[in-house]
Amino acid sequence: MQSIPSPALGPDKALAIGAYGETVAAYRYLVFAERVDRKPHRDAFAAMADEEQDHKQRLQKLLARLYPDSDFVLSERDKEMVVVGPRLLDVRDDARFAEALNFTLQTEQRTSAFYRSLAQTIPDAPLNTLFKELAEEGAEHYHRLRNLVQDVTSTDIK
């Protein structure tokens, strides 16, 4: 089930939720990079972590600049708009690693849908453009991760 933001979700909270999701994604990709055996896979996961970290920083800078007085404590429902599964992953064995990869694939889909929905509902031009871009990048990450998962599970998971 893909979650979409509530019509009452303002741009400041949307930025905060997006930054949370990007933080979780960056962490997950770093965990994956540490778990796999082959250097090309480590490099691919590390590169995706860097991209997610960049997204997080962009969102946080915009939030600080546009809404300096915003202060959110995100609820579980807020977090579920952009993350599937637990925030912290257990990848100590192959079955859990495969499950974590699946959670992250679902998360990329959910995050892309979240940003796509925001691009349709938030009229502010700079934010609208950013959300469209992040929706496209989320979809691209999903496809890259799906291909990487197929390769990793055939070589790194015995």
Image (cartoon, rainbow, N blue to C red):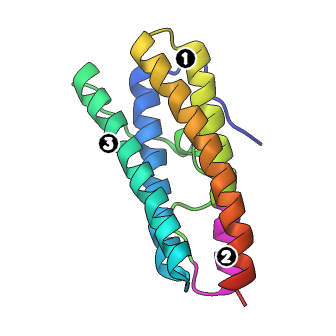
Q: Look at label 2 and name its amino acid.
A: Val
In this picture, residue 108 sits left or right of residue 70: right
User: Up-down: is 107 above or below 147?
Assistant: above
Q: Quadrant of the C terminus?
A: bottom right
x%, y% of residue 72?
36, 35
Q: CA distance from mark 2 to mark 1?
A: 41 Å
Segment tinted magenta in the rendering: 91-103
User: Up-down: is 74 above or below 46?
Assistant: above
Q: Look at label 3 and name its amino acid.
A: Gln
x%, y% of residue 120?
61, 15
Q: Nearer the viewer, mark 1 or mark 3?
A: 3
Is the residue under label 3 in contact with that under label 1 (CB below 8 Å)? no
Q: Residue at x 69, y 51 (%)?
A: 143
User: Up-down: is 46 above or below 34?
Assistant: above
In this picture, residue 84 sits left or right of residue 38: right
Residue 152 is marked as 2
Q: Secondary structure at mark 2?
A: helix
Quarter of the image for residue 80 reads top right
Residue 8 is marked as 1
Q: Residue at x 55, y 17 (%)?
A: 8
Local crowd size for mark 2, using a 10 Å CA cut-off: few (<14), some (14–19), many (≥20): many
Q: Is residue 94 magenta?
A: yes
Q: Is residue 7 magenta?
A: no
Residue 57 is marked as 3
